[in-house]
Amino acid sequence: MERLDVTILGREYTLACDATERESVIAAAQHLDRTMQRLRNGSKPGTSTERIAIMAALQLSAELLSTPVAGSQNGEFALGDYKRKIEDMQRAIDGVLPR
């Protein structure tokens, strides 16, 4: 593991990551910083950093769940679609298994 310093919304954070993950962690931190900057600029003055972070997490989660899955047929499924299908299968299995 190596130490990595990133800046998000003007604050410095020290992270630990594998050397092989360094570039992707930097890219993720920069993407998060841009998202949080945009949200802060569009928010009412005085909006807390915590609120901005939660709004950014929700926005990024929505992006992730709507991202098409590589190798899906005709790009018909997004990650969230697969997640919902798996949850439906788990409920169906739980419904027939004895407790």
Image (tube, grey):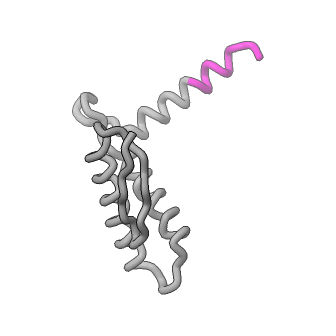
| Left or right of 45 in this view: 4 | left
Q: Position of residue 9 (x, y in %)?
A: 40, 70
- Above or below residue 7? Residue 23 is above
Residue 40's quadrant in the figure? bottom left
Q: Give me the residue at 47% from left, 57% from top.
A: 57
Q: Nearer the viewer, residue 81 or 18?
A: 18
- Above or below residue 50? Residue 60 is above
Can you name the residue that lies furthest to the bottom here?
45
Q: Position of residue 36 (x, y in %)?
A: 40, 68
Q: Position of residue 23 (x, y in %)?
A: 26, 47
Can you name the residue that lies furthest to the right here?
99
Q: Main secondary structure of the magenta part?
A: helix
- Above or below residue 64? Residue 93 is above
- Above or below residue 76? Residue 89 is above
Q: What range is drawn magenta here?
A: 90-99
The count of marks equals 0
Q: Quadrant of the C terminus?
A: top right
Q: Give me the residue at 41% from left, 66% from top.
A: 12
Q: Nearer the viewer, residue 70 or 26?
A: 26
Q: Give me the residue at 52% from left, 79% from top.
A: 47
Residue 5's quadrant in the figure? bottom left
Q: Give me the residue at 38% from left, 49% from top.
A: 3
Would residue 26 be counted in the magenta stretch?
Answer: no
Q: Position of residue 72 (x, y in %)?
A: 27, 29
Would residue 97 be counted in the magenta stretch?
Answer: yes
| Left or right of 54 in this view: 19 | left
